Image: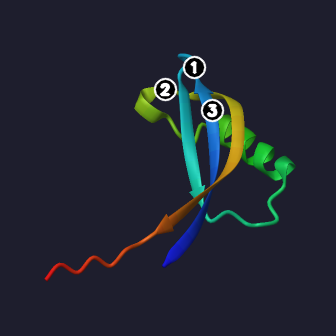
Amino acid sequence: MENLETKLLMTFSTNFGKKVSLFVTDPRQDLTEAEIKSAMDIIVEKNIFAPGGEDLKTPVEAKLVQTETTEYDLVVA
């Protein structure tokens, strides 16, 4: 059985210059670049996340990632 999973990957830089990525699983199919940029700006503005104690400073990039998984039922007798 094959499964195709889609995630929105949003990457930010922190106040110490590190890159941090956040995933959103199964984003809307009609999501626009403007909506993604707006959401990333709000995340930074509201200081919602502080990974490792570092504040997110700037949105860097966003992309949709699709992963195809094939599962095998391996029955060992």
CA distance separating discs 2 and 1: 6 Å
In this picture, is 5 found above or below 9?
below
Q: Position of residue 71 (x, y in %)?
A: 41, 72
Identify the residue at the far top of this view.
16
In front: label 3 or label 2? 3
Residue that numbered label 3 is attached to: 12
Q: Nearer the viewer, residue 44 or 27?
A: 27
Q: Residue furthest left?
A: 77
Q: CA distance from mark 3 to mark 2?
A: 11 Å
Residue 50 as seen in the image, left or right of residue 42:
left
Disc marking residue 54? 2
Q: In the image, what residue occupies the spot 23% across and 81% down?
A: 75
Callout 2–callout 1 Cβ contact below 8 Å: yes
Task: Please tell me whether mark 1 sits on a helix, a strand or a loop.
Answer: loop
Which label sits on residue 15?
A: 1
Q: Is residue 34 above or below residue 73?
A: above
- N-terminal of the pair, mark 3 or mark 2, is 3
* Vertical position of residue 11 compared to residue 77: above or below: above
Q: In the rendered structure, which amino acid carries the disc numbered 1?
A: Asn
Which class describes the residues within 10 Å of circle 1: few (<14), some (14-19), or many (20+)?
A: some
Residue visible at 82% across and 65% down in the picture: 30
Where in the figure is residue 68, as x and y percent of width and height? Answer: 55, 63
Place of residue 77 in the rendered image (x, y in percent of width and height, measured from the top left)? 13, 83
- Which amino acid does the dot numbered 3 rest on? Phe
* Mark 2 neighbour class, 10 Å CA radius: few under 14, some 14 to 19, many 20 or more: some
Q: The disc labelled 2 sits on which kind of residue?
A: Glu
Q: Is residue 66 left or right of residue 76?
A: right
Q: Nearer the viewer, mark 3 or mark 1?
A: 3
Q: Residue at left 54%, top 72%?
A: 3
